[in-house]
Amino acid sequence: MMKTLLAATSLAAMALAATPTQAQDNAEAEDFAAMMERVNQLPDTPGDGPHPSLIEVVDDLPDHVVYRPADLSAVGPNGLGVFVWGNGGCADDGTSSRFHLSQIASYGYLVIAPGRWRSGPNRLEDPAPPRAMDADGQFPPSPTSAAQLTEALDWALAQNADPDSPYFGLVDENALAAGGFSCGGVQALTIAGDPRLDTVVVQNSGLLPPDAPRLGGMELGKEGLLALHTPVIYLDGGPTDIAYENGLDDYNRIEHVPAFWINTPTGHGGTYHEPMGGRNAMIVVDWLEWQLRGDTTAGRTFTGENCRLCTDPEATIEMKNLR
């Protein structure tokens, strides 16, 4: 298990792993604090896509952070896909995966995450304290909710229809996706039944089995998978990922929509804090380009003879229910 990231998602981790000793808990918290101190010194990045991105907070979408191409004039009509994102731990930090989300935005996406701007050298607020179990062993309420992902989607579509908005006419209403990390992946699955969505991306996550304790924000049961009506991709971190078994179980249960299950050897921490979001950010970009824009070159990452992930010795890919 990637100890440094365990505290970052002590959320899902606490619900999925055995309770650590106090000494282990303190060590993990110290490791996480040291890691985040280093990460928070790293500058925000614009991604390496054709539309360098920026991060902003907008007045009419409180409690969210927006990632978008810096030059909207270069996007063109219907040029923006939309990707609403649930944070790891369902945390109140819309910049906790800022490298990952900036990378996606640089490929022409309006990316919106709930929470405040709490990470990086340009953060506007102090980091949120990590969630921990109460003295009575109960998990605290989630600081963000799946409803905020729907709120973000509503806002993006309203902006597209508003002549006074900088996004007027720029959003492709047939290119809408939801995704998330760990607890945030459960948020994405919680809104998966929204008929406006075109795909769902679940990263280092999966729905908990019926008898598992539930951190606030992870209440959705396995029956929630029946709401899926779009292709779905699970991107997990191999057997050392605490969400591995849950993600695999979800995949095995899905029989009514196209489903992909991909593992790379990252553990639960993924590649969120790597430059440009690391390899997993590019896997997500290729998925969105294929599913939302019909880019068959991007689709070669996932399907076809000798697909890119099929021939990657560090990746495992399974797929089913393909149309």
Image: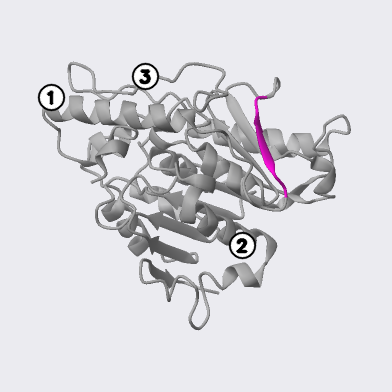
Q: Is 194 left or right of 18, judged from the image as shown?
A: right
Q: Is residue 20 magenta?
A: no
Q: Which residue is mark 1?
A: 22
Is residue 139 depicted above or below 231 in this figure? above
Q: Which residue is mark 2?
A: 291
- Three-letter code for the amino acid on which mark 3 is drawn: Pro
Give the class, few, some or many, for how many residues have Cα within 10 Å of label 1's Cα (few <14, many ≥20). few
Q: Are marks 2 and 3 in contact (CB under 8 Å)?
A: no
Q: Are marks 1 and 3 in contact (CB under 8 Å)?
A: no
- Residue 7 x, y percent position in the rendering: 29, 32
Mark nearer the N terminus (1 vs 3):
1
Q: Is 254 left or right of 308, judged from the image as shown?
A: left
Q: Residue furthest right?
A: 163
Residue 37: which quarter of the image?
top left
Give the class, few, some or many, for how many residues have Cα within 10 Å of label 3's Cα (few <14, many ≥20). few
Mark nearer the N terminus (1 vs 2):
1
> What residue is at 23 percent from the left and 46 percent from the top?
1
Q: Which residue is mark 3?
A: 129
> What residue is at 13 percent from the left and 24 percent from the top?
22
Q: Residue furthest bottom?
A: 305
Part of the protein shown in magenta: 51-57
What is the secondary structure assignment of the residue under circle 1? Answer: helix
Residue in the foreground of this view, choosing between 268 and 232 = 268
Is residue 107 depicted above or below 289 in this figure? above
Q: Is 275 left or right of 139, judged from the image as shown?
A: right
Residue in the foreground of this view, choosing between 37 and 263 = 37
- Residue 85 x, y percent position in the rendering: 53, 40
